[in-house]
Image (cartoon, rainbow, N blue to C red):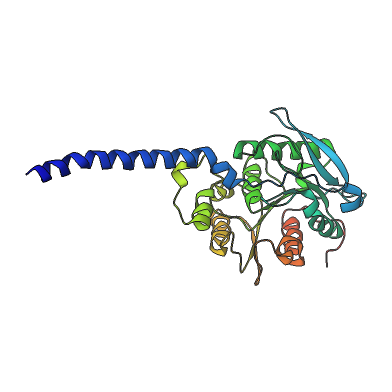
Amino acid sequence: MAERTHGRRALPRVAAVVAVVLLVGIGLVLAFQRSLVFVPDRSSPPAVDDALPGAREVSLRTTDGLTLTAWHLPAPEGCTSTVLVMPGNGGHRGSRAPLAAALASAGFGVLLLEYRGYGGNPGSPSEAGLTRDARAARAYLLDAGVPETSLIYLGESLGAAVAAGLAAEHPPAALVLRSPFTTLADAARAAYRVPVGALLLDRFDVVAAVRRTTMPVAVVLGGADTTVPPGLSRSVADAAREARREVVEVVVPAADHNDAPLVSGPDLVDAVVDVAILGSAPPCLPAR
């Protein structure tokens, strides 16, 4: 009888320990999740003249008072079609110079956005912060004389979520999503095998944003992507089709998330050209 009584008394203690462990775990997730979601390269990029000839370093002013540095390569004389590049998590604007050069060769102007906390910029990244940064980049291009009807948004991975959100708010001529995920929760589950959606401070719901868009959409994905599973990107394309958008879907065979053919190769550039034409914002020079 005494042993049973002792066992019953021990149960509340075990339950209390489990509860404490769970609370501590939840607290750690809430406290440190942004260091897992955002992995900024804080180093300063090379000089713009060395990395991307013809481009210039420009300043973007956000609505919460930050001054961000970005690179702008204007469209060829007499042209206005410009690609606003919203980067993914890795690298800085220097590592995206090959993409900008490839887009410029296809006849586009390019603005390489650099988020807060990345590439020597001040601030700390968050979903709300990156959204403000994208708005600031768009505002800069409009002030520089690029019409809304000549803007193409290109978002890479995490940046695809930023681009889709901006497109739902401020429609461009066309939207290009490279390696997009459906939601941040889905991407986290794929990466860490843990269902943490309810605890996430940032949502990045790409599917919901795409459903609110009105322009042609291109989805470009790697057939061997180990960071964003191809199925997630295909679901984004399906969501655009269900919303009755014109969709260009391109699979780069055997390409992983950061492989050059997917990051800046001809398949990606051709997709930008094709969707820009659908959006009545063709490049100035022939792409092929």
Residue at the image position 78 percent from the left and 54 percent from the top:
95
Query: Picture coordinates of residue 48 (x, y %)?
Result: 88, 47
Please identify the residue farthest to the bottom as the structure is shown.
254
Q: Is residue 98 left or right of residue 232?
A: right
Q: Is residue 24 left or right of residue 233?
A: left
Query: Picture coordinates of residue 124 (x, y %)?
Result: 66, 36
Location of the N terminus by quadrant is top left
User: Which quadrant holds residue 15?
Assistant: top left
Residue at the image position 61 percent from the left and 36 percent from the top:
128
Query: Picture coordinates of residue 68 (x, y %)?
Result: 77, 36
Q: Please tell me whether residue 258 is drawn above or below residue 151 in the rendered image.
A: below
State the residue in front, 100 or 66.
66
Please identify the residue farthest to the top as the structure is shown.
65
Location of the C terminus by quadrant is bottom right
Please identify the residue farthest to the left as the structure is shown.
1
State the residue in front, 168 or 56.
56
Q: Is residue 285 left or right of residue 19?
A: right
User: Which quadrant holds residue 120?
Assistant: top right
State the residue in front, 3 or 112.
3
Q: Please tell me whether residue 240 is drawn above or below residue 205 in the rendered image.
A: below
Residue 55 appearing in the image: no
State the residue in front, 33 or 159.
33
Count of numbered labels shown in the rendering: 0
Query: Picture coordinates of residue 30 (x, y %)?
Result: 49, 39
Residue 286 appearing in the image: yes
